[in-house]
């Protein structure tokens, strides 16, 4: 449970995948957010499938989360504006835990969000539908976000192109992908990411991230 020094106790394991406005593979992975996005800004959706997890004892396993992110320049310089879509299947305690984690208020792996996010433009309970099958990943949040991506095939056709042993905040292993049919229509944003950069990353986050 929480105490004055450590804050809330939480953990998430699962997968994060995203599609953004970069024309080629995300430069943030190798530069740790110091290099500007290829278009000078980063527009993105993110999908988080929580395979297992908890927040202060409340089970979060099986829940999905969607994020709309509008980043004005280098990722590491902040100024992010984000909307959070929380699985409608989450009860009140799980919903609150997810909001604490993804606002950065819970500390730990996502604690950096308190410095990077300048405005949370909305928090909604929605049916966040995530599908993971073979090389493809998709998210559907009504008409707000409809995204589908596909892993890039490597020299060995049985293995996708993967960057390993990175120091990226999401996780050390990042699979390169590309957007297929991918659209955002919400909060005044009208974005299309078909053919754009995408990535998939196994996540193991928590209130006491490994060093």
Image (cartoon, rainbow, N blue to C red):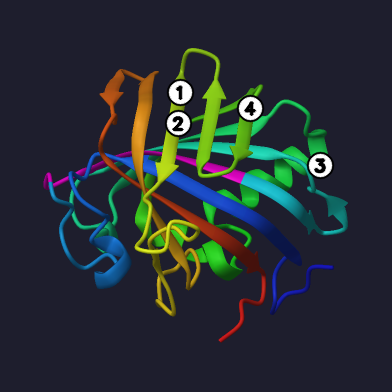
Element under label 4?
strand
Distance between the alpha carbons at the discs numbered 1 and 4:
10 Å
Distance between the alpha carbons at the discs numbered 1 and 3:
25 Å
Q: Residue at x 82, y 59 (%)?
A: 56
Distance between the alpha carbons at the discs numbered 2 and 3:
30 Å
Between 70 and 147, the one nearer to me in the picture = 147
Q: Which residue is mark 1?
A: 145
Q: Say which label, 1 or 3, has the lower sequence index.
A: 3
Distance between the alpha carbons at the discs numbered 2 and 1:
10 Å
Q: Which of the 4 image quarters holds residue 175?
A: bottom left
Q: Which residue is mark 4?
A: 129
Q: Say which label, 2 or 4, has the lower sequence index.
A: 4
State the image coordinates of residue 95 (x, y, percent, origin top left).
72, 38
Between 120 and 195, the one nearer to me in the picture = 195
Q: Say which label, 3 or 4, has the lower sequence index.
A: 3
Q: Which of the 4 image quarters holds residue 2?
A: bottom right
Residue 148's tag is 2
Position of 147 relative to 31 (above/below)? above
- Report the side of 90 relative to 37 (left or right): right
Q: Residue at x 48, y 12 (%)?
A: 143
Q: Which residue is mark 3?
A: 93
Mark 4 packing: few (<14 Cα in 10 Å), some, or many (20+)? some
Distance between the alpha carbons at the discs numbered 2 and 4:
12 Å
- Magenta span contains residue 170: no
CB under 8 Å between discs 2 and 1: no
Question: Viewer-nearest of labels 2 and 3?
Answer: 2
| Magenta region, residue range | 39-48
State the image coordinates of residue 170 (x, y, percent, origin top left).
48, 63
> Is residue 156 at all visible to an observer of this figure?
yes
Mark 1 packing: few (<14 Cα in 10 Å), some, or many (20+)? many
CB under 8 Å between discs 3 and 4: no
Element under label 3?
helix
């Amino acid at each position: 449970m929480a105490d004055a020094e450590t804050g809330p106790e939480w953990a998430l394991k699962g997968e994060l995948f995203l599609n953004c406005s970069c024309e080629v593979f995300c430069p943030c992975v190798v530069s740790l957010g110091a290099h500007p996005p290829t278009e000078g800004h980063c527009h993105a959706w993110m999908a988080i499938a929580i395979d297992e997890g908890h927040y202060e004892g409340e089970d979060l396993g099986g829940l999905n989360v969607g994020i709309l992110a509008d980043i004005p320049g280098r990722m590491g310089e902040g100024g992010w504006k984000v909307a959070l879509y929380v699985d409608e299947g989450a009860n009140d305690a799980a919903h609150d835990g997810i909001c604490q984690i993804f606002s950065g208020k819970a500390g730990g792996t996502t604690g950096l969000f308190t410095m990077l996010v300048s405005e949370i433009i909305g928090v909604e309970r929605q049916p966040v539908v995530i599908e993971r099958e073979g090389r493809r990943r998709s998210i559907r949040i009504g008409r707000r976000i409809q995204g589908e991506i596909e892993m890039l095939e490597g020299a060995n056709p049985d293995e996708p192109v993967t960057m390993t042993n990175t120091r990226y905040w999401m996780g050390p292993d990042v699979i390169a992908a590309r957007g297929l049919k991918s659209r955002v229509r919400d909060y005044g944003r009208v974005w299309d990411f078909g053919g754009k950069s995408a990535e998939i990353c196994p996540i193991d986050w928590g209130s006491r991230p490994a060093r």
